[in-house]
Structure formats: C-alpha cells, structure tokens
C-alpha cells in the first residue's frame, strides 16, 4: 500500500469514528466526535497540499504550498472555539439536569404514541 492510500483510509476512519460518536445521546461523546472530525478535516487539508522545502531566499526548487497550512491553522482555531462552546453547553446541561445524556422529549413521545396508536386501528 502506498502512503496516499494509508492516509486516505486514516482520514475515512477518523470521519467514520467521529460521525459514530456524534450520533450518540451522550453529550461528551458528541464533543469527542466533533473533535475527531476536526482532526480528520485537518489531515484532509494537510494531504491536499504539495510537499516541498521552506521558501528560503536564494534557493530555487519546489516550495511548500502555504494555503493548506493557513487553512489548517484556521480550522484548528474554529474547532477550538466550537469545542469550548459545546463544553460550556454540556456543563450547563449537567448543572440543570444532572445527566450527561439527552433525555427523550415528552412531547415527541406523546406524538409517537399517537402515531403508533392511530396506525393500529
């Protein structure tokens, strides 16, 4: 296997694991899933760049593309900000409910009971 295939499989694994964690009802798993997807996005941006040397004055040759590096830095900052916001929301939810999982909404349960009851008649 080449290096590009390994990186592609790793990126796919990170995205798949992050989506799996985000589908959980536990809020801490949702936060971890978001962070794993952020790392997958950073790796995807890094792999889209072209390798090369540092742009030193007086040297010719291929230079590294600065655009993916700038996008990764921006992605890190955005992921950190959203993670802090999600952590504050999780903490506030825990203060109010003392539960780490999101409970079922009573209105949704009532609507589902009406829907299943109406279909059996």
Image: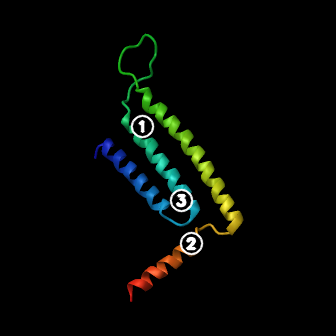
In the image: residue 61, left or right of residue 21: left
What is the spatial separation of the Cα atoms under label 3 and label 2, in whole angstroms? 18 Å
Image quadrant in which you'd find residue 106: bottom right
Q: Residue furthest bottom?
A: 121
Image quadrant in which you'd find residue 32: bottom right
What is the spatial separation of the Cα atoms under label 1 and label 3, in whole angstroms? 24 Å
Q: Residues within 10 Å of mark 2 (few under 14, many from 20)?
A: few
For the residues carrying marks 1 and 3, which lies nearer the camera in this image?
3
Q: Secondary structure at mark 2?
A: loop
For the residues carrying marks 3 and 2, which lies nearer the camera in this image?
2
Residue at 50% from the left image edge and 65% from the top image edge: 24
Residue at 42% from the left image edge and 53% from the top image edge: 15
Taking 24 as reference, is 118 above or below it? below
In the image: residue 75, left or right of residue 86: left
Q: Position of residue 108 (x, y in %)?
A: 52, 73
In the image: residue 43, left or right of residue 109: left
Query: Of callouts 1 and 3, which one flags the residue occurring earlier in the amino acid sequence?
Result: 3
What is the spatial separation of the Cα atoms under label 2 and label 1, in whole angstroms? 41 Å
Q: Which mark is residue 30?
A: 3
Q: Residue furthest right?
A: 95
User: Which residue is under mark 2?
Assistant: 105
User: Which residue is under mark 1?
Assistant: 46
Q: Residues within 10 Å of mark 3 (few under 14, many from 20)?
A: many
Residue at 43% from the left image edge and 10% from the top image edge: 58
Q: Quadrant of the C terminus?
A: bottom left
Q: Residue furthest top?
A: 58
Q: Secondary structure at mark 3?
A: helix
Residue at 34% from the left image edge and 46% from the top image edge: 8
């Amino acid at each position: 296997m080449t290096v590009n295939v390994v990186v592609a499989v790793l990126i796919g694994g990170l995205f798949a694991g992050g989506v799996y964690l985000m589908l959980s009802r536990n809020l801490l798993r949702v936060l971890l899933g978001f962070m794993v997807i952020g790392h997958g996005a950073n790796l995807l941006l890094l792999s889209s760049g072209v390798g090369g040397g540092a742009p030193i004055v007086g040297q010719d040759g291929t230079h590294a593309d600065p655009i993916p590096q700038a996008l990764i830095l921006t992605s890190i900052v955005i992921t950190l900000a959203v993670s802090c916001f999600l952590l504050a929301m999780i903490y506030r939810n825990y203060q109010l409910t003392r539960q780490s999982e999101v409970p079922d909404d009573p209105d949704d349960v009532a609507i589902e009971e009406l829907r299943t009851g109406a279909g059996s008649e």
